[in-house]
Amino acid sequence: MSDRNDPLTAYVEQMARVLDLSLSPEQQAGVVDNLEKIEAIAKFVNDFPLPETVQAAPTFQP
């Protein structure tokens, strides 16, 4: 579980207020844990080096 002063915890608390969601402490901890996992996966994807020759394509063709 995250530190209460963690930015992700603050984000979850703020978004729950914005969306008028009532989260129990256990639910909030679960949301923060999932966001931490998503953050780690996103960092892995964003840090993956791509060669300069790669071009974005509007459709996927295997």
Image (cartoon, rainbow, N blue to C red):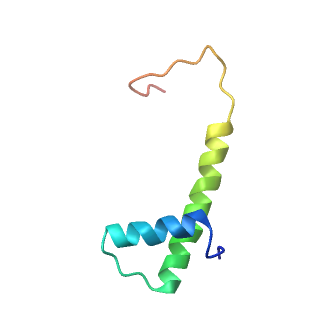
The residue positioned 59% from the left and 47% from the top of the image is 42
Q: Position of residue 17 (x, y in %)?
A: 36, 72
Left or right position of 57 against 17:
right
Q: Where is the N terminus found, in terms of image quarters?
A: bottom right
Image quarter of residue 59: top left
Is the residue 49 above or below the residue 25 in the image?
Answer: above
Could you tell me which residue is drawn at 62 percent across and 41 percent down? 45
Q: Farthest front residue? A: 5
Residue 21 drawn at (x, y percent): 34, 76
Q: Residue at x 44, y 22 (%)?
A: 57
* Picture layout, residue 39 above or below residue 58: below
Q: Tell me where residue 39 appears, x and y as whole percent.
A: 60, 54
Q: Nearer the viewer, residue 37 or 6?
A: 6
Q: For the point 52% across and 84% down, which residue is it?
A: 26
Q: Quadrant of residue 50?
A: top right
Q: Nearer the viewer, residue 11 or 29?
A: 11
Tell me if residue 52 comes above or below residue 8 in the rendering: above
